[in-house]
Image: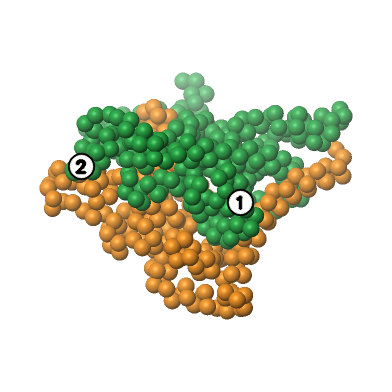
Amino acid sequence: MNYLTKRKLTYTLVAIPALGFLTLQIIPLIYAGITAITDAQGNFSLHNILFVLGDKLFLQGLKYNIIIPISSVVLEAFIGVAMAIWFYYLRRKKTFWRTVAIIPFAVPQIVYLLTMKLVFRQHGYLNSLLYNLGGADWIVNWFRPGSILSMIVIIFVDAWRVTPIVFLIVLAALEQMPESYIQAARVDGASLWQVIRHIQIPLVIPALLVALSLRAVDAFRIFATPFVLMGVQGMPVLTSVAYHYKIDANNPAAANTTALILAGGLFIATALTLFLSRKRNRI
Amino acid sequence: MNKNDTYNRTESDLSDRIEKSSLWWRKIRTTMGNNFGLIILLIINLGPIFLVVRQAFAPESESATWPLTLLPSKLSLQNLFNLWKTQSLLEHLLLSLWVALGTTIISIFIGFPAGWSLARWKKIEGFGTRFAIVSRILPPIAIAIPLTALLIPLRIYNHPFGPGLILAHLTIGLPFAILLSYSAFLEIPNELEEAAYIDGCSTFGAFIRIALPSVKGTIATAFILIFLLSWDEFTYALLIQLTHRTMPPLIYYYTEFGQLASASVLAVIMLIPAILIIVFLQRILNRGVLRGGIK
């Protein structure tokens, strides 16, 4: 092949999206960085950063932005693996039930959140059910700001939507695994539980890690779930706090600072994870 | 017993053996446990969807009743008609469709050639995949807020035809198209294009005539998935189209102001393309495209 002409062509074809990436992501980021460290007159100042770090809403957002994603990812991992193993041994029309299992992920996020709002709101379907079962005493305020219960509901709602990703990747890994591993263990007298515990789970861990590392980044960028269900004040996370600064408080500099703190934290965490995993692989 | 039988065994045979070796009551318990679990799964996943459809087609007066009933007293299209009269529903719907189509077509037109270049030219491979990873890490809100400030002087902020939003959605659609096409082109042998090149085809011609037709299925997959990514996208749409809203922010505003019946009608409309993904996702999964796209 004539690589000289090919090289020119390939560079051009890659340069177009790269330029697009530069203009659409790097330039806004630089602009955000500049607004974060300057005041209204354009002089260097740490005013925005100090304002944000001293704001109660931001600190609350930071707290929730750590608790919710971590619990959500852990929950996804457990439910996803458990469901995958259950489906592996299921003797049913698998295609149909797999479709049922991925519904929360397949419907649009906003529609999923609207359904959850219909179910969990004060005069919603779950409270109607509880009222019919046990009267007015049984009614629960699922979204009381600051309560542990509301946090648990948000974590479950957030985790349940993306569990299908973990479930599908782990199930695919289970089904690709050679049957002979399990047969050998069965012949040697292992129980079903021992097969799951000592053969299947250890062998799906690489696939699980891929799925979770994908999910972890998304989990820390959480925005719509607490924002739609409880509002900015009800359950702030860093993204919704940034939205609040920008739209409600009309303070774009503080909004940019908040968003950049989140982006920076994520970037450092990702780089650190990659670095550590590479170091461990080398040993 | 044929020697091949040991290799052709499916897992259901194995679980058959496992269950046959167990006691009969354990077998019954397993079957009942499975049925119970599947019914719970069905209720948790399909129940809320049913409730949204129920809310959309119930008379509006019923949404304020307490306690709520599982079935509406009668079916009506009143909510849809109300929405049609008070809000220019069609405008929002067409804007959403237009933005999603624009994003999809541009992503595929730019992304597939780039994916092909990355797959065929090893030197820039690492650069391209790294760019796709970095663009995944950034939270959309960190881009959306400064982007609104930059779109205002270009006069495409909150534009009725949403060009600013298409640009923003490209940051999601383009990496997706590149990764998906990259993994698809890697599976196609280089020799086909080389043969075409030797027979007098230009490099670009080899791409158009040989490489592209052999990834037709991936193009269809990319089309559906990018369309749905843009159709569902919430954060950019919320910040960039402040008054000329696409469907997801519109649903959010109706939810926020307590008009859940109207929000449910919009949600049912939004669900229609989502049914596509439920049908197509099975085919995509069977082909293993999803896993390739992730790697």
Coloring basis for residues? by chain
Residue A200 seen in this snapshot:
no
**Nearer-the-camera pick, A94 or B193:** B193
Q: Position of residue B180 (x, y in %)?
A: 62, 41
Inter-mark Cα distance, 1 to 2: 44 Å
Q: Position of residue B267 (x, y in %)?
A: 40, 39
Q: Are marks 1 and 2 in contact (CB under 8 Å)?
A: no
Residue at 52 percent of width and 24 percent of height = B4
Q: Which colour is chain A painted?
A: orange
Question: Residue A242 has which mark?
Answer: none
Q: Is residue A90 left or right of residue B10?
A: left
Q: Is residue B202 left or right of residue A55?
A: right
Chain on which label 2 sits: B
**Residues flagged by tags 1 and 2 on a common chain:** yes
For the colour green, the matching chain is B
Q: Amino acid at mark 1?
A: Ile
- What residue sits right under mark 2 in the picture? B65
Instruction: Identify whether A236 is placed above or below A120.
Output: below
Q: Quadrant of residue B207?
A: top right
Q: Amino acid at mark 2?
A: Thr
Q: Earlier in the sequence, mark 1 or mark 2?
A: 2
Chain on which label 1 sits: B
Local SS, label 2: loop
Q: Quadrant of residue A109?
A: top left
**Nearer-the-camera pick, A209 or A271:** A271
Residue at 16 percent of width and 46 percent of height = A131
Q: Position of residue A15 (x, y in %)?
A: 74, 50
- What residue sits right under mark 1 in the picture? B156
